[in-house]
Amino acid sequence: MDATILAQQAINGLILGATYGLIAIGYTMVYGIIGMINFAHGEIYMVSAYLTAIFLALAQFAGITSIPATLVFVLFFTLLVTALHGWFAERIAYRPLRGSNRLAPLITAIGLSLVLQNYVRLSQGARSQGIPSLMQGSFILPIGSAGGSVQITHVQLLIIVVAFLGMAVLTFIMHRTSLGRACRATEQDLTMAALLGIDTDRIISIVFVIGAAMAAVAGVLVSLNYGSFDFHIGFITGIKAFTAAVLGGIGSLPGAMLGGLILGLSESFFSGFVNTDYKDVFAFALLVLVLIFRPSGLLGQPMVTKV
Amino acid sequence: MKGKVYGGWVLFLMVLMVSSAYAEETIAIGVAGPFTGAYAAFGAQLWRGAEQAANDINAAGGIVGKKIQLFKGDDACEPKQALAVANQLVDRHGVQAVIGHFCSSSTIPASEVYAEAGILHITPASTNPMVTERGIATLFRTCGRDDQQGSAAADFIVQKLKAQAIAVIHDKDTYGQGLADAMRAQLQRLGKKEILYEGLTRGEKDFNALVTKFKSLHADAVYFGGLHNEAGPLVRQMKEQGLKAPLVSGDGIVSEEFVIAAGGPAYADGVHMTFGRDPRKIKEGQEVVDRLRKAGFEPEGYTLYSYATLQIIAAAIEATRGTDGVAMAKWLHAHEVPTVMGPKGWDVKGDLKTSDYVMYRWNDKGTYDEVVP
Amino acid sequence: MGNKLFHPLATGFLVWILTLPISGVVLDGYFFSFHWQPPLVLALAAFLFHSGILAVRWWHSFGKLLKEKRGLGDCPQGFDFAVDQSSLSRSTRTLPKGAILMALPMIVGGVLPFFLNKYWLTVAILALIYVLLALGLNIVVGLAGMLDLGFVAFYAVGAYGYALGHEYLGLGFWSSLPLGAMLAAGFGVVLGFPVLRMHGDYLAIVTLGFGEIIRLVLNNWVSFTGGPNGVRVPGPTLPGLEFTRRAKEGSIPVHEFLGIDYSANHRIVFIYLVLFMVVLATIFLVTRLKNMPLGRSWEALREDEIACRSLGINHVTVKLSAFALGAMIGGIGGVFFAASQGFVNPTSFTFFESALILAIVVLGGLGSIPGVIIAAIVITILPEVLRDFSDYRVLVFGLAMVIMMIWRPRGLVRSVRPVFREHVR
């Protein structure tokens, strides 16, 4: 096995994994706080991909030409509007069901993802859309035997940097600020937190907003990297990201990133060295195996049954 | 949302009233395809082509004095829905002929319903060999077959591109895999063996691992059986990783959306594809092309195929003075019909007598030209 | 109150902001065109909707005010407790009424195929298949309380069991029906075994994984399953009789046997009637199981696993039996699906299908058999009725799912839990 190819596949997997990880954060935080699988999260990511293209077109229309300025413009507005979507979704589809049957929000989430998908399709048309490539060029690193080299494009590097930056900021918020403390308190015991004067409704809203914002970051980066999307992308990416969240231990922030990276790397290596046909089978089999031996994921808290 | 839905109801009631008022004087024809779902763009092509043809025929007085009325059947390219749609078209709308089903995986189950009802069924787009290989007498197509298409591509790759290490990729769907298999079969006949034969997952965007694999195997040509949604990102990632091997594909990427999905003309540049002789360039069709362009619709892909299909149905009804599917099929098997795509004739299976797959190459302006042999 | 009136305005404004980029700026290649109307229409709709809700609430509270204040006030819908009827005493008390209620759908369902055209008949068959699937999943999720997101796997096993059994072993419909059921039940046990230790959502994701693995294998193993091309399935036959215009050697077409004209409908009517019987039998089976020790231990295990185990209930057999029985019913649904479609391929067994079946079970009311049946019929017929909206079909379907769930979070028919009540006399 060639070291160059091995390194290149590792980079491929890392980038794929980083995007899974970013989206998985939305699943893991929402699950941590209200114990609910937000199946509409993949669609929020899909919406953010459309928003990226829309704001990119608007930026060009407004005459913004420098790449960093465009990036900041697009990231800012996409984040804002996607976060609003996340907030709205929680407000109309999940909050009315708070404290009710545990499976009810799961069904509204499925309904909501159908609504979002078709809303986007009806508004933007069914055809696949794309964005012009904004950043080109790549770094070439000589690795491996005899003139072999590994390349990483600027966008791919940006993905890795932003993903880890995002994780760092989020970890800081969760562990060092009063907002984070309130989040953790709500996560541990919703009723108790409410009794102690934390506005839990607000905290839950904020968690949805943070999740959506991370999905938006992923949406911007992935759109820049692959350049094309359609109203259908949320589904498959959503399932993969959810798998990543569970693999890492749902409810745990570093777990989401770790799960994403493991999933991305395993897909990449399996596809690269074994067979692309069965890469998803391998990914799911890995998940099942991990859960059989560690029933709450790699970094998850073991579930304590209260008696 | 409410306003739109309400508008939908009003429209529906109006259509119902209009259709019942004119029920006696119309010929009902179904247009089935993916009008929602990931492949809705192709459904739109089928619909616009048929719609234009119906308008043109109706403006000229209709067929045997009756006007044509079209009914939409949305299968979203799912076999389960295709069957429901087929039954709906036959039983609720009482269609007398059907244009359609885009995906071969929908056409195959639906065709059994039409055959059972004895309805003429012509698909303008399903190229899988299985469609006509099952011996249904009332089933025709106005497009080529994947085995013809696949072997045209294999000939081109081996003889023109002089490729030695050929990777064959498909999207694990009836159409894409059928095409890839046909291509592989012809490769074997030419005495070559592919270095890689694998399927990617429809709906994914990241094929970097696969591209790196091409590199590690030193592929000098890549054949992809599938649609533009996956072909776009695939070619982009190939270029980004600096792979020199050209991508060759089939008629699933005949749409300007391919350029958008690839990230711009610069990425789509140099991609080859097989497709029937560009119908927009056939002289019989110029008038129709102009009319569609004036209405703001570029008649790319299967638009004119769908137009021609309705012309063929109209011709068969005209000739047999009726809408009996078996009689029309018999007539079509024996006669050639002039269409916007030139005259068309069929063999016993219902395939076109002459197939004319040509190799095209996308250029750096986002359009495609025929590769001069 | 004045504050309340401001809310719809705020909602409308928020919706306007929210929809401005997505429906206002329509992408066209790498450029866009601006449409100012759609966001405005949507905002207006949201405003009116919110005002409507407020008006209804106001009317409601006004009516309550007239009826004097009650001590409790309005209790949120999710929280009112199950009626304390003992299921045993209920069944004896309301038997005549119950018998009528049971008989009516049976008669209607039985004569239905003679009034429907082929299109509605296929929809009815699909509805009955979903009733079966939902009844099966209801055992696992509703009664045993294990969230299964990969139920479609068993459905696929049943359908492919029939299709491949015919392809390779030449099995007919009647031998495939029990074999498909057994095969699916076997898969249920095999898949159920490793997940015994898991709870809640980990169980959900593992079952989702299993469901996807089965679909992917069916799609990729081209030499055995035909891959995406699928497998053709013959229609069902009565012994020695066939539902074709001209029969193969050695058998007689049904229409000649009965001395009636050939119609393509006969085969479908036949499938419908057989399916209808099977559904009735399944309903009977599940209702009885619910009241048997096994059913009671499913529900007990759902409520409190630790208590059950300490009382000596073997959680392994109880859980596995729920998995196996659910899977078996799903497998039967699959066999009927293959028979009615005449063609199976992996696109019919995606995760979305599992989600749909789960939606039926939850919408119907977890554990409630009549609720699940009603929900299955609603969920299958609704998209077909909405077909006339064509483009808006799925959107309206999704909206309906959200609204129905918010309106009745416990499902259409809430299952009445058997409650032990001391008879004080």
Image: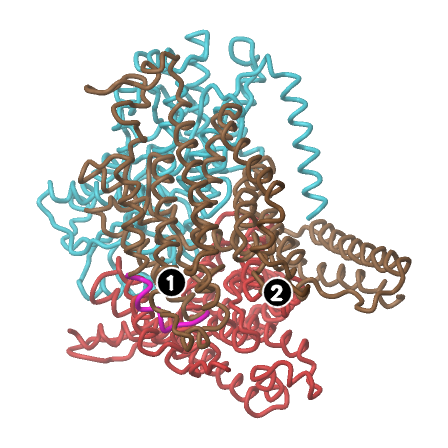
Which mark is on residue A172? none
Q: Which residue is mark 1?
A: C207
Choose between B93 and B346: the one closer to the eye: B93
- Which chain's colour is brown? C
- Which chain's colour is cyan? B
Q: Position of residue A42 (x, y in %)?
A: 50, 63
Per the picture, the main secondary structure of the magenta-coloured stretch is: loop
Marked residue nearer the N-terminal end (1 or 2): 1
Mark 1 falls within which chain?
C
Corner quadrant of residue A172: bottom right
Q: Secondary structure at mark 1?
A: helix
Q: Does residue C193 belong to the magenta stretch?
A: yes
Choose between B133 and C91: the one closer to the eye: C91
Q: What's drawn in magenta, residue-wise?
A: C190-200
Mark 2 falls within which chain?
C
Chain A: colour as depicted: red
**Closer mark to the observer between disc 1 and disc 2:** 2
**Is there one chain holding both mark 1 and mark 2?**
yes
Crowding near the residue tagged with mark 1, few <14, some 14–19, many ≥20 C-alpha atoms within 10 Å: many
- Against C301, residue C168 (above or below) is above
Q: Residue at x 33, y 12 (%)?
A: B330
Q: Position of residue B81 (x, y in %)?
A: 45, 39
Q: Residue at x 36, y 12 (%)?
A: C259
Q: Which residue is mark 2?
A: C421
Q: Amino acid at mark 2?
A: Arg
**Would residue A85 appear left or right of C45 to someone viewing this image?**
left
Please, which colouring scheme is shown? by chain
Q: Position of residue C46 (x, y in %)?
A: 74, 55
On-image quarter of the N terminus of chain A: bottom left
Q: Gap between marks 1 and 2, in whole Å?
A: 38 Å
In the picture as drawn, the residue positioned furthest to the bottom comes out as: A176
Q: Does residue B238 belong to the magenta stretch?
A: no
